[in-house]
Image (cartoon, rainbow, N blue to C red):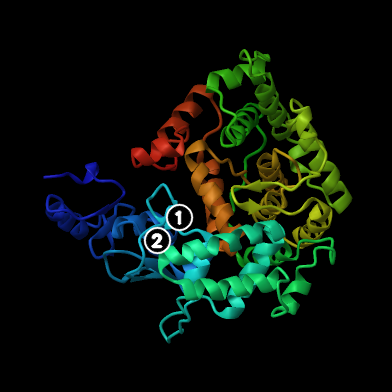
Amino acid sequence: MQSLKNLPELFTTSPSSRQIISYALKTNRVRRLARGLYTKDIDTPLKDYVRRHLWEIVSKLYSEPVLDGRTALQNGPANDGCIFLVTSTGQNTVLPGLTIYVRRGHAPLSDDTRTRNGVRIPSPARALIENMVPSRASSRRVARTYSQDEIEAYLDTYLERYGEDGLSRLRDQVPAVGQQLGMTKEAEKLDQVIGALLGANNVLPEVARRTDKGETRIDADRVVLFEKLFTALHEFIPSDRPVSAINPAKNELSAFYEAYFSNFIEGIKFDVEEARDIILTNKVPQGRLEDAKDLFGTWQVVSGAAHMSSPPTSFDAFIRQLRTDHASVMQGHSSKNPGVFKAKANMAGDYVFVSPEKVAGTLEEGFAMLNELKGGFRRGVFAMFLISEVHPFDDGNGRMARIAMNREMSADNQSRAIIPPVFRDTYFAGLRSMSRVGNTTALIRMLDFAQLWTSEVLWQDWAETRSILEACNAFLEPEEANEHDRRLMRPR
């Protein structure tokens, strides 16, 4: 018979585990999430736990699930907590705060993306075709598919971000995908809507006018995102996590790991001892001069107690500081134009950031909101997302965003938020969820936990701190952590 300690944190029942699960439930050592699904986490509020582990839960409950309807286009739950899936097995499932609705449909296609948890994200062509099937909302849930207006708005945004060439490529994929799905009529309707956006006819003149890129110097969609985050942060009550009087040794140690981890999660990886030699003795591993300069430049910025406690009070000062920090961090990469805003569009996967001509205006709109927020955590989260979403430089934007975040937190005498490797996927998932579907809760809670964890680490002695970080699984990369069912643990 299995023992409870050998089961992962999130698990389903099996014949060999039923007896021990029954006993663990009675003794409050596990909690039930749904029929046959349990967690050993007994502290996190269940709604929060479900949101944090959503796709892992989905993969435990269903075999090869494909996101369906509005879930496929939002890449997350609807506002009422509904999730729609296509599966070959399984039934609807009610979870704390969420309800999963399933239907039988077409198996995954070759262009559908498989996540590390086994959940399939349909290609935009498939998702849009399947959303062309009308559906109705009920008293219990939102409509499964987008309305015509919602589809047009989605395509409007797609055109804004990917341009006419990108939308044309999507249109070219629609007929073949429609054939594969057996949904040629829906594919033809979608083709007409896309054709209208591209000017093939005059069905949607209002939308066509809205996509005129010469109208404004700001990215209006991003400003809407910033306003949503501003409102959520204004309503959020952060925990007070003050730092003690500055201890030079403590500041040096926490700054080291802040710089080390901030570079590590961006792919600039050194052994801890190598990184320590780079920063403290200027000893550079052979062939790693540029990467070493990145690490050292980041450390120079984050280790300056006075510099990191003085956020800019005007937009001009904000831009100057952003460029100065970037020039320091990217000093080893002249090809990346240190301290200079981008001249070409940049993207992460298929997600396009703010276009170069709209960088300054969009940053200015965001900074005006930042100036109205009170409290280091609120301001830090907003500053981080502002820079991350605009992506003003050719490279190094993630590090700039985290520096800006921690500067705001330090200025309010609050603990910074350090992102260790094991937390990387959670961090980027929070950003993606905010960027793509405006999920403020995921972003705020993710950074709230990062700050909590950082505040609980004793940044005092090199050896002791390293032992603490190892015990917290901080050094593990996400792939290894997932393989062994580990996550970032709070210091004990």
For the residues labelled 2 and 1, the Cα–Cα distance comes to: 8 Å
Residue 313, horizontal then vertical, whole percent: 84, 52
| Up/down of 221 relative to 463, above or below | below
Q: Give, as a three-letter code, the residue at label 1.
A: Asp
Where residue 460 sits in the image (x, y, percent)?
Answer: 56, 29
Image x and y of residue 266, in percent: 60, 36
Asked whether the residues under the numbered discs 2 and 1 touch, taking CB atoms below 8 Å apart as contact, a structural biologist would say yes
Q: Who's the residue at 62% across and 57% down the image?
A: 169
Q: In the picture shown, does residue 201 fall above or below 373?
A: below
* 421 lies left or right of 66: right
x, y percentage for residue 435? Answer: 61, 58
Reading the image, the residue beneath label 1 is 112
Disc 2 crowd, CA 10 A, few/some/many (<14, 14-19, 20+) = many
Please give the name of the residue rendered at 54% of the width and 53% of the height, measured from the top-left corner. Answer: 430
Q: Is residue 430 left or right of residue 101?
A: right
State left or right for residue 186 relative to residue 198: left
Q: Is residue 77 visible in this depiction of the protein?
A: no
Q: Nearest to the eye among marks 2 and 1: give it.
A: 1
Which residue is depicted at the point 42% across and 35% down? 473
Crowding around mark 1 (Cα neighbors within 10 Å: few <14, some 14 to 19, many 20+) is some
The answer to whether residue 200 is above or below residue 365 is below
Relative to residue 204, is residue 30 drawn left or right? left
The numbered mark, 2 or 1, whose residue comes first in the sequence reads 2
Query: Quick one: SS at disc 2?
Result: strand
Q: Secondary structure at mark 1?
A: loop
Which quadrant would the C terminus be assigned to in this image? Answer: top left
**Pick the front one: 25 or 62:** 62
In this figure, which residue is indicated by the disc labeled 2?
Answer: 66
